[in-house]
Amino acid sequence: MNIIRQIPNALTCSNLICGCMATGAAFYGNYFWAVTMIILGAVFDFFDGLSARALNVSAPIGKELDSLADVVTFGVAPSAVLFYLFHEVVYPEVLVPFQKFIPYTAFLMAAFSALRLAKFNLDTRQATTFIGLPTPANALFWGSLVLGQHAFLCSGKFNCVFLFLFIVLSCWLMVAELPLFALKFKNYSWEDNKMKYIFLAGCLLCLPLGYSALAAMIVWYIALSLVANHRR
């Protein structure tokens, strides 16, 4: 029985291991393996909560462990991906002397991911909705974007300034007072779930984008949430 009760923690630790592997792969420039491990970590993150509810297991250590694993997989790992990308993007001539230092700004994302997770643990408003972009969504956006649009990001049409500004934007989105709808279904009626069904339909249209599909889905998710908030 005790072993069964440890299943959620084992899944959480698997998430943490995936995050460590993703970080290691990112430092070697292996974007595909890094993103694959972030996605696998997200799968473990989903099932650890699901298994805890199914087994009726609730303990403070599980919550703390989950946040720690999420910081690594969805904060440190995507930061490492962007750290390596900073060594590949174009630098304006005026910033070339700072080329050795600018990549470290990528780790702002790890810090804001930790802040986002800490706020989530304490914010009772986020039981049925999200306030700010969830860290898994942010990590999946960057992984998908770097994997699918690597050639563009490293071209003359893009540079380190744009990359830094987009990192700042994503950091802000994680901690902003921005209501985002959750994808949990209490029932399957159209009236109660119209935004969710519209979102899922849009996701199907994103699939032909290949590696960039997840990034497009996250943008679609944010845009749809903004529309829903405007109508209230």
Image (spheres, helix red, strand yellow):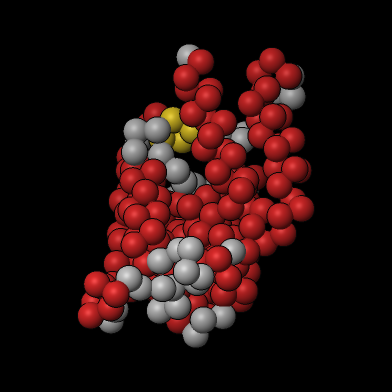
Q: How many marks?
A: 0
Residue 199: x %, y % from top left: 66, 34
Residue at the bottom extreme, as displayed: 28
Q: Is residue 114 visible?
A: no
Residue at point 62%, 45% (across, down): 217
Position of 50 with respect to 126 (left or right) is right
Relative to 69, is 226 above or below?
above
Residue at point 49%, 33% (across, down): 180
- Give the image quarter of residue 92: bottom left
- Give the image quarter of residue 45: bottom right
Q: Is residue 93 visible?
A: yes
Relative to 16, is 193 above or below?
above
Residue 85: x %, y % from top left: 45, 73
Residue at point 37%, 49% (across, down): 169
Q: Quadrant of the N terminus?
A: bottom right
Residue at point 41%, 39% (across, down): 132
Residue 178: x %, y % from top left: 40, 33
Position of 9 with respect to 113 (left or right) is right
